[in-house]
Amino acid sequence: MLQAPEGSVCSLELLDDVAQDDGAGAVKLVQSKSALTANPVADRAKSLWKTLSNWVELAATPGFEVEKAIFELYVSRPVEGTIVGGFARANTLESARAAIAQARTELWGCPPEFDLKPGVAAEISSYVEKVFTADQSLLERLICNFRLTLGSGSPQADLEALVRSHPVSPSKVQDITNHLCGVVKRHIDLLLEVGKPAVIARDDFHGWYTSYVQKIDRQTVLSSRAPAPSEAVSRGYLPDNFIRQLDIIGLSFEEMLGAASDYFMASFDRTDWAARGEVDETSFDDLDGVLKRAWKNKQRTCGLNHGSRSEQHQGQALYFDCMQFTAPVQAMSPPSHFIPGCFHMLADDLLVGWHPNYEAHLKLKKVA
């Protein structure tokens, strides 16, 4: 259903193990093999020849349009088989005819003697017989539409890979996949309970998918995974520009350590959110622009409101005003330490400052 076209329906154990019907005659029939130990597509595998035999019988049904059908054999892990490989590569009537002839020779020997035929195992002989004695034109068209699909060995990982290829946050892929598996199973169970076939419309599934993604992947709050730094780590920032700026305006040692903690955690969050795909990196550039504009406006307001006070007082007033400023990140609310921490990053690069003459004071302190 993750790959089915719009308007189609998918079924379980109805037309085949799994099937897809577009409503206009085109169907995709899927035989699913787990292959935990044995190879279900080996040249003499019962599962292979039973599947082909069943498909031949279905294709011969009056009204069945072979040209509109895809016959897919899905195996959950990488496996090989000479015969199945030849069938899978055949995409023209000529190549299908050659693949069938090669398979017949492999199992029965060369015509017309077919001297190997008596050696075919009893458990597959009837299935092989039905395939090789079927109407050749029908069989060739069936093989033309045969597909072999191999999983990675982990169906759950393969499902997650499909969801990951869609525009959803990487951190939400497992949750979305687990939810969809649960919804589909429950829906099928409810249908079977009342004696109805296990059929689900792709568009219904798409609606479940979309609504759940909108619920969990359109979050309004950004969660921080940043660990609080130890005092030793916070002390390591004391020589940095953003801490020196706080020293210039006369903040306490405890306030400087708090600023160092905000800086550390905000830096961690920016890297973590970007790596997880929760926030696009360009959004941080947009945020920095917002913070610089807010700082500039507040700096002017501070000059008007506190111009008669000392420059250190003006710096403190501007700093505490900015520390209360809030701004969303991609329309999501960040944790309380994040905006202050981002202001400290800008202050560290001297793009903003608290003292009216912070750049000159920093140069003097550096010389001193």
Image (tube, rainbow, N blue to C red):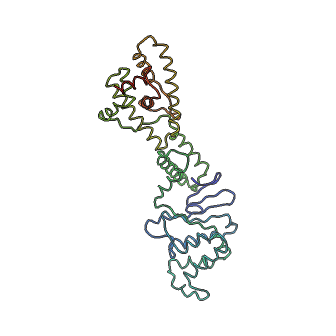
Q: Residue at x 53, y 38 (%)?
A: 282
In the picture, residue 13 is in which quadrant?
Answer: bottom right
Residue at figure coordinates x 45%, y 38% from the top left: 270
Vertical relation: 83 (above or below) 289: below
Residue at 47% across, 29% down? 351
- Residue 81 point in image, percent of width and height: 51, 73
Please state if 93 lies on the left or on the right of 294 as rendered: right
Q: Is residue 302 above or below residue 177?
A: above
Given residues 341 and 304, the one toward you in this image is 304
Image quarter in which the C terminus is found: top left
- Is 130 positioned to the left or the right of 277 in the image? right
Specify the farthest residue to the left. Answer: 232
Can you give x and y, in whole percent of width and height, for residue 209 in the image?
Answer: 55, 46
The quarter of the image holding the N terminus is bottom right
Q: Give the image quarter of residue 231.
A: top left
Of 77 and 199, the residue lying toward us: 77
Would you identify the image quadrant in which residue 309 lies? top left
Q: How many marks?
A: 0
Does 95 appear above or below 187? Answer: below
Q: Is residue 236 left or right of residue 273?
A: left
Left or right, 36 with reference to 9: left
Question: Residue most toward the top?
Answer: 308
Q: Which residue in the rendered view is the most extreme toward the front?
A: 367
Relative image position of residue 88 (x, y in whole percent): 58, 69
Q: Position of residue 62 (x, y in %)?
A: 69, 69
